[in-house]
Image (spheres, helix red, strand yellow):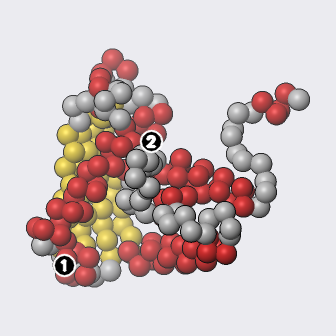
């Protein structure tokens, strides 16, 4: 939710006062994350997403004072079902406060299965393509990861829409097609 909604807030210059999110998990993920040490790692990765996308240093009036809280609750009867609650306090023009509430009911395995299949196919493609073979980190696949890896010194991109554009442009490059720029200048030729 953060990688989808935060770019929209930033694009529309909506401020963020706070974001409280909690997940209710009943499978092995929930059991593992019930351990404080394991949760700490997950919490840090989830908390960092908003910082990367919203860039509070560049937009201090909008995001400099945001409060962000993440909770994960293990509830064995939930099984593979997952429930994510997000309470998002935003503000608009003249500081007018608004709220967004998200209640996402899903199954982790149903969400993960197509992602894993895509990754297997794309990694096989990378292995066979001269342009991608031997690169190590395949940053163009960041679309599929909550915590994208990058080569040292490169800024990790968390904005889902920019990640998707990188993926599409990499595939277009491999096919020898023109990259997508969305400049629109070609319409006037």
Mark 2 Cα shell of 10 Å, populated few (<14), some (14-19), many (≥20): some
Residue located beneath label 2 in the image = 7
Q: Position of residue 181 (x, y in %)?
A: 68, 40
Q: Residue at x 37, y 21 (%)?
A: 93
Can you say whether 40 is above or below 81 in the image?
above
In this rendered view, identify the residue nearer to me: 161 or 76: 161
CA–CA distance between discs 2 and 1? 31 Å
Residue 124, image quadrant: bottom right
Residue 88, image quadrant: top left
User: Dot 1: what SS?
Assistant: helix
Residue 31's disc number: 1
Please, which residue is most extreme toward the right here? Answer: 189
User: Dot 2: what SS?
Assistant: helix
Please, which residue is most extreme toward the left here? Answer: 36
Sequence order check, earlier mark of 2 and 1: 2
Q: Position of residue 168 (x, y in %)?
A: 65, 56
Can you say whether 120 is above or below 133 in the image?
below
In this rendered view, identify the residue nearer to me: 34 or 103: 34
Q: Position of residue 108 (x, y in %)?
A: 38, 74
Q: Position of residue 89 (x, y in %)?
A: 27, 38
Q: Residue at x 25, y 82 (%)?
A: 28
Q: Quadrant of the N terminus?
A: bottom left
- Left or right for 142, reference 68: right
- Left or right for 34, reference 90: left
């Amino acid at each position: 939710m953060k990688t989808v909604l935060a770019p929209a807030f930033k694009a529309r210059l909506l401020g963020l006062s706070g974001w409280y999110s909690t997940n209710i998990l009943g499978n092995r993920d929930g059991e593992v994350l019930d351990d404080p040490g394991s949760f700490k790692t997950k919490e840090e990765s989830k908390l960092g997403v908003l910082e990367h996308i919203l860039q509070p240093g560049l937009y201090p009036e909008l995001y400099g004072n945001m409060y962000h809280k993440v909770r994960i609750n293990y509830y064995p009867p939930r099984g593979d079902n997952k429930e994510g609650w997000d309470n998002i306090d935003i503000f608009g023009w003249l500081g007018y406060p608004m709220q967004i509430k998200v209640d996402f009911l899903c199954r982790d395995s149903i969400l993960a299965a197509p992602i894993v299949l895509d990754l297997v196919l794309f990694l096989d493609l990378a292995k066979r393509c001269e342009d991608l073979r031997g690169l190590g980190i395949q940053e163009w696949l960041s679309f599929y990861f909550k915590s994208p890896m990058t080569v040292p010194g490169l800024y990790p991109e968390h904005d889902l829409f920019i990640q998707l554009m990188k993926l599409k442009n990499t595939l277009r490059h491999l096919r020898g097609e023109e990259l997508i720029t969305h400049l629109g200048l070609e319409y006037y030729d």
